[in-house]
Amino acid sequence: MRLQILVIPFLQVALVALVDSLREVSGYLGDTVTLLSGADPSWNLSTVDWSIFSNNTWIATYRNGKENLERLDRYKGRLSLNISSGDLKIYNLTTEDAMEYTVDLINTEVQDSVNKIKLTVRKRLQEPTIQTVTCRSIEGGSWIGLYCSSKDKDVTFSWEVKPPSMTVFTMSHPNGSSAGLLAFVNTTQNLVEFTCTSSRHTESTSSVVTGNCDDEKLLPQPQPLPQPRSRDGVVFFIGCILGVLLTATITYLFGEKIKDAWQCFKENLPFKK
């Protein structure tokens, strides 16, 4: 009985040492990520073993002063090991790299530490595409309608116009696939910059077009629009912009309040703004 009492606490300590911590790290497809070993900075490492899978398949090791980074074909030429810290770098990330990694550390005083790191691999947001829906010159300026879309899902859109326009309307499709902008540019603004930004969580990317209705080279030419989940939504979406453009032009020429055009714009949307 006394022997059992001594052994059980020993096993409990050993189990605690097996998994010291579990951290999560994320990287982007094609980029480089560093998996921190979590080694005590005061340690002088004698052994570093990085492994994957439940059977602890080694992918990178450092033993007896020698490192081996070619233990598994899928990682050959893509690993770098810091023998002082035990940190592991993985280059040219692939989706298959997303998994749990285990690092077993032993210092020169034969102290052991085991840490686990969960790696997730994400794809960077693609730059949104800006297309010209319509561009009509009127007295004193022009109305420019742009359509911005993204191949990524669950993104939000925002627009920026430089120099700022006094009259700008924006809208977004409810499924997050696209956004539109209708802006009035007066004749004194020779070059206008339109920026569409798509964002998801803490990541964002932008596309920029410049020009005006008199500068066809700078504005993107109309291209076939991407097919979202609802084809009818695109038809209403573009038609709404064109309808508002016509209404806004009429109200401008006849001196009516521009808010009437915006009200019409909202009422004809296939979703509630």
Image (cartoon, rainbow, N blue to C red):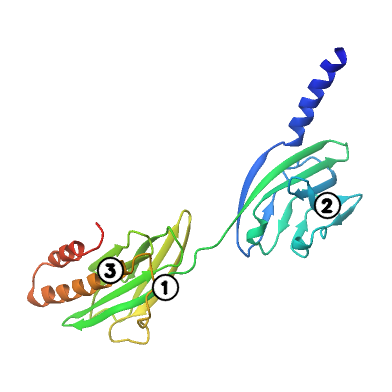
In percent of width and height, residue 161 lies at 32, 69
Of the two numbered discs 3 and 2 on the same chain, state the one appearing first in sequence: 2
Q: Residue furthest top?
A: 1
Direction from residue 12 to residue 46 in the image, left or right = right
In percent of width and height, residue 3 lies at 87, 16
- Amino acid of disc 2: Thr
- Number of the label disc, if any, that sits on residue 61: 2
In percent of width and height, residue 177 lies at 38, 64
- Amino acid of disc 1: Thr
The residue where tag 3 is placed is 237
Tell me where residue 103 sits by quadrant: top right
Q: Label 1 neighbourhood size at 10 Å, few (<14), some (14-19), many (20+)? A: many
Q: Give the distance between the C-alpha atoms of the residues marked 1 and 2, in whole angstroms.
A: 46 Å
**In this rendering, which labeled residue sits more in front, label 1 or label 3?**
3
- In the displayed structure, 112 sits above or below 73; it is above
The residue where tag 1 is placed is 129
- In the displayed structure, 37 sits above or below 199; it is above
Q: Residue furthest right?
A: 64
Of the two numbered discs 1 and 3 on the same chain, state the one appearing first in sequence: 1
Q: Which quadrant of the figure contains the C terminus?
A: bottom left
The residue that appears at 87% across and 37% down in the rendered structure is 110
Q: Which quadrant of the figure contains the N terminus?
A: top right
Local SS, label 1:
strand
- Amino acid of disc 3: Phe
Local SS, label 3:
helix
In percent of width and height, residue 129 lies at 41, 73
The residue that appears at 85% across and 46% down in the rendered structure is 47
Tell me where residue 180 sits by quadrant: bottom left
